[in-house]
Image (cartoon, helix red, strand yellow):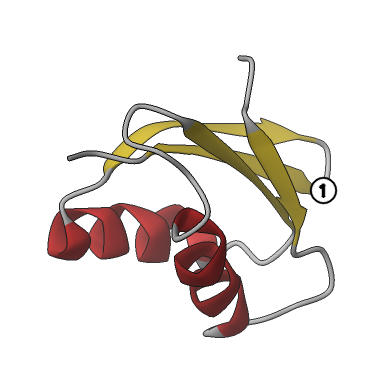
Amino acid sequence: MDADKTIDCVGLYCPMPIVKTAQAMKELEPGQVLEVLADDAGIKSDMPAWCEKTGNECVSIDEEGDEIKVYVRKTG
């Protein structure tokens, strides 16, 4: 998936990937996609919950070895 911005949260643990995601989302326009790289398995449940709470869209969660790629689309 093509992302408009990527943040590297590898080595960071809850709640830092969500904190960094919230900061990065402020820089995006509605409809743009943020790619979050992480290795904390907690992000697989934390990110969808955060998206539901904030109204953003968790587009996909892909695992490649130890790395997890989460794609979040900014809404309205």
Picture quarter with the N terminus: top right
Q: Residue at x 75, y 65 (%)?
A: 9
In this rendering, the answer to whether 53 lies above or below 4 is below
Percent x, y of residue 36: 64, 49
| Image coordinates for residue 47, horizontal then vertical, percent | 40, 58
Per the image, label 1 sits on a secondary structure element best described as loop
Residue 32 found in image quarter: top left
Locate residue 17, reporting x and y percent.
Answer: 60, 71
Please provide percent x and percent y for residue 72. 43, 40
Above or below, comparing residue 53 to residue 16 in the picture: above
From the viewer's perspective, tell me whether residue 21 is left or right of residue 6.
left
Q: Tell me what residue is drawn at x 34 percent, y 41 percent.
A: 74
Q: Give the left or right position of residue 55, taking residue 30 as reference.
A: left
Q: In which quarter of the image is residue 63?
A: top right
Q: Does 62 sit left or right of 64 as displayed?
A: left
In the image, residue 67 sits, relative to residue 47, either above or below, namely above
Residue drawn at x 49%, y 32% as measured from the top left = 33
Q: Which amino acid type is marked by label 1?
A: Asp
Instruction: Give the class, few, some or many, for how many residues have Cα within 10 Å of label 1's Cα (few <14, many ≥20).
Output: few
Number of numbered discs overlaid on the protein picture: 1
For residue 57, above or below residue 66:
above
- Residue under numbered circle 1: 66
- Residue at horizontal 37 percent and vertical 59 percent from the top: 45
Q: Which of 7 and 52 is in front in this view?
A: 7
Quadrant of the image containing the C terminus: top left
